[in-house]
Amino acid sequence: PAPAAREDGSGSKEKKRQEKEDAVVTAQKLLLTWLCEDTGLFEKIGSWISPEDFTDPLCHEAAVCVFEEYDTKKTVTPARIISLFEDKDEHDAIARAFNTTIRDEDDKAAREKAINETIRRIKTASLEHKSKTARDISVLQEIIRQKKELQKLHISL
């Protein structure tokens, strides 16, 4: 039998939190795939997203490699980055991350909308994560400023 939901409702809260985390991780994987497929995106998203915005530890590690390789070589080789992960589970997870896709990727308007939503989701999660650990008022003010800027986000392809 399925476990009964808690009477205080926290079971559904936990499920929603997990779904939100999963959506953010999926967005991070999707962006990694897109950056490898189209390095022109680096110039378009560079002012919005950096490796520090990848909150999932494995995606963060991969993002650091992807951004560094692009910065030094102006290209990204997913196979080389995947090979840096020696742990089999991590290796397989990164390989899957570099192959994350969505439907309608060939439709330019749909792709543009997906990129904007993906950037917004990743950056929002990153700012929420930073605000939980921020102790300095100037850091909190900067987070608020960035959240306002994020509302204006529009990346054109």
Image (spheres, rainbow, N blue to C red):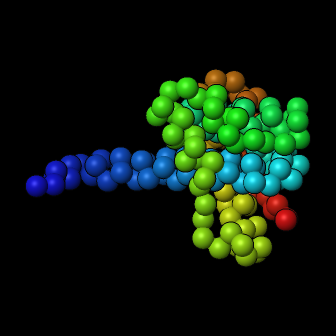
Q: Residue at x 48, y 31 (%)?
A: 88
Furthest-top residue in view?
A: 135
The answer to whether residue 66 is above or below residue 1 is: above
Q: Quick one: quadrant of the N terminus?
A: bottom left
Task: Return the residue nearer the eye: 104 or 96.
Answer: 96
Quadrant occupied by the C terminus: bottom right
User: Looking at the picture, how far across and down is residue 132, in whole percent?
Assistant: 57, 33
Q: Position of residue 125 (x, y in %)?
A: 60, 45
Query: What residue is rendered at 51% in x and 40% in y?
Result: 92
Which residue shows up at 42% across the image and 47% down it? 18
Question: Whole-percent x and y of residue 9?
Answer: 27, 52
Residue 34, can we see it? yes
- Point out residue 7 in the picture as x, y percentages from the top left corner: 19, 51
Number of numbered discs:
0
- The answer to which of 25 and 4 lies nearer the viewer is 25
Residue 112 sits above or below residue 6 on the image: below
Q: Is residue 27 visible?
A: no
Question: What residue appears at the point 52 percent right and 41 percent down from the top-left corner?
Answer: 93
Depth check: give the residue in front, 77 or 153: 77
Q: Residue at the left extreme? A: 1
Q: Relative to the observer, which residue lies in front, 18 or 140? A: 18
